[in-house]
Amino acid sequence: QKEVEQNSGPLSVPEGAIASLNCTYSDRGSQSFFWYRQYSGKSPELIMFIYSNGDKEDGRFTAQLNKASQYVSLLIRDSQPSDSATYLCAVPSGGSNYKLTFGKGTLLTVNP
Amino acid sequence: DTAVSQTPKYLVTQMGNDKSIKCEQNLGHDTMYWYKQDSKKFLKIMFSYNNKELIINETVPNRFSPKSPDKAHLNLHINSLELGDSAVYFCASAYSYNEQFFGPGTRLTVL
């Protein structure tokens, strides 16, 4: 099993809909989880991080963590065309909190 | 006021040449990273330094040599460039093992 897996997409949603992005990880010892957004030709930027089981909300973004199922998701409510980007899930792995392993990313397109 | 900066932004060179990429952060972070993002957009860690000490050294050809003269700088030198080295190289920094902040990237093209 790959260390961090994401549904590769592409995922296409209409403007105003909820976009749901999923990520599973293999290292049960992972304690922190990060979601990055990367626009085409740009660098990744952090949009959410979560450490505890449950939901964490920040504006239109909600991160959901289930450590028992080794699953972390990102929900984007009221999706906007400006949300169109690749979303990368990142999890510490290899026994080091310093080493982030990134998923391959999910390309999201929000259609006006 | 740029947080993490890299130079150059673009680098086009011939196979066999040696080149360097520089990275600087003004966030006061103690940890810096080099990542490689290939044509399929897969982002993979290469090296990490914490307080100028190498703490992560992934399976990278020894043609790649990082150097951290101080906590705010991390450079990457690449010897004998090969076609497969063409990619975007990102520098990132963090305070300890917290959230990482990325630089704008250096697009390396080897001809």
Image: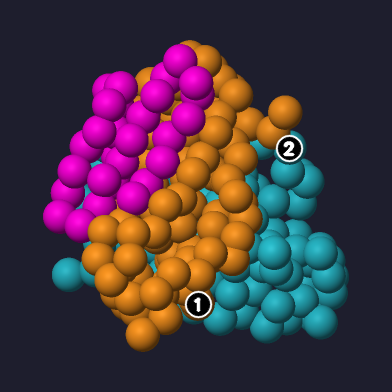
Chain ID at mark 2: B
Q: Please say if B85 is above or below A32.
A: below
Residue holding disc 1: A41
Q: Please say if A28 is above or below A14.
A: above
Give the residue displayed 76% in from the left and 76% down from the top. B110
Please tell me in which quadrant of the rendered image residue B79 appears. Answer: bottom right
**Chain A hue?**
orange
User: Do dots 1 and 2 share one subunit?
Assistant: no
- Residue A32: percent from left, percent from top: 36, 28
> SS class of the residue under badge 2?
loop
Q: Is residue B84 shown left or right of residue B27?
A: right
Amino acid type, mark 2: Thr
**Chain coloured cyan in the rendered structure:** B
Q: Is residue A50 shown left or right of residue B37?
A: left
Residue holding disc 2: B59
- Residue B111: percent from left, percent from top: 81, 82
State the extent of the magenta-drawn residues as a range. A48-75
Amino acid type, mark 1: Gly
* Residue A70 in magenta stretch: yes
